[in-house]
Image (cartoon, grey):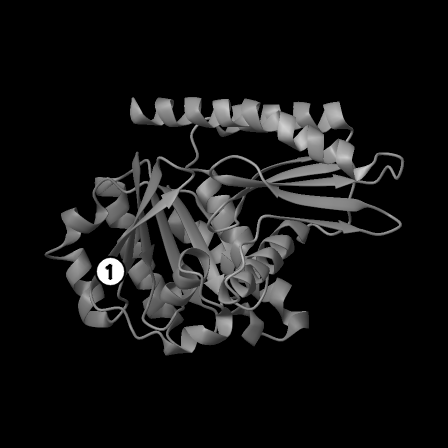
Amino acid sequence: MKKKVLLMGKSGSGKTSMRSIIFANYIARDTHRLGATIDVEHSHVRFLGNLVLNLWDCGGQEAFMENYFASQRDNIFRNVEVLIYVFDVESRELDKDMHYYQSCLEAILQNSPEAKIFCLVHKMDLVQEDQRDYIFREREEDLKRLSLPLECTCFRTSIWDETLYRAWSSIVYMLIPNVKELEQSLNQFANIIDADEVLLFERATFLVISHCQRQFHRDVHRFEKVSNIIKQFKLSCSKLAAQFQSMEVRNTNFAAFIDIFTSNTYVMVIMSDPTIPSAATLINIRNARKHFEKLERASQSSALTR
């Protein structure tokens, strides 16, 4: 099942850098080597087995942008599932950015009115920390007002922290078939083994696709931080010709288990009960695999029949 994802924004806003970090295993400091996108760069990213993201990374130079809204309008904006528009928070041409965004919305309204709209206010690391909340809220209000009658969801992002993973996890979550059924099973699994939290990560990107939380945790960004850390660790393993498969982290407060789960996912289980031995949790993870593999196959079959 293919889902067309349109990635747009002015040249230099950071579209290709974020795509390369999420889907091509780049690290942030290496993205400076990437050149500007010429016209439209197509890629097909396999996600969770049979879900294929048909990603259209659209060059943001003025000549290309004008062309998208004129001669290529129907081709670019037809059958779009998701529009991701990236704004450079420090752009000196905000009015022009907003003009192009509004032109995108008009084309989406005509060609793909059911598409979901996401706006990423990017490069937030360049803004003083005490100003970030205010600037993002102000930009979010403007974008939501400008998007009417369509609805947009806004995220603040940077390639240098976990915010990029948070945004893209939320975006792909909207595209996963039968995700509610997956979440119900994750809740049941967490209750059976008395886990504080259980998370599912997509195997290649390490984006969080589902989670269950049974205990309060003050850090709301922990999932994305874990995504970032483990993905970098996996890349380090690859450079040493080692295969990352599983790990356990334990201290006096909790134990965290990360293990291959299904053919397309990793699972992370957080336990704070010190009386539960590691072997018992690992056995429970192994026993749950069959159920989740069956669920995954059913989801893929459902997707193929659509």
Which residue is label 1 attached to? 41
Residue 52 percent across, percent down from the top left: 33, 41
Q: Is residue 182 above or below residue 107?
A: above
Camera sees residue 214: no
Residue lying farthest to the left in this orientation: 71
* Image position of 209 (left or right of 283): left
Give the left or right position of residue 59, taking residue 199 as reference.
Answer: left
Quadrant position of the N terminus in the picture: top left
Relative image position of residue 42 (x, y in whole percent): 24, 55
Q: How many marks?
A: 1
Residue farthest to the front, as pictured: 241
Q: Residue at x 42, y 29 (%)?
A: 177
* Quarter that holds the C terminus: top left
Where 59 falls versus 150 (above or below)? below
| Amino acid type at image mark 1 | Glu
Whether residue 141 can be seen here: yes
Neighbourhood count class around disc 1 (C-alpha, 10 Å): few under 14, some 14–19, many 20 upward: few
Q: Position of residue 188 (x, y in %)?
A: 67, 23
* Residue under the image location 64 percent in, 54 percent down: 226
Left or right relative to 62: residue 230: right
Q: Hey, which quadrant is residue 217 in on the image? A: top right
Q: Nearer the viewer, residue 167 or 1?
A: 1
Compared with 113, 247 (above or below) is: below
| Residue for point 64% across, 57% down | 225
| Residue at screen point 24% across, 39% down | 79
Q: Secondary structure at mark 1?
A: strand
Occupied quadrant, residue 302: top left
The percent position of residue 195, horizontal first and vertical second, equals 76, 33
**Residue 281 vs residue 271, the one in the foreground:** 281
Q: Nearer the viewer, residue 165 or 138?
A: 165
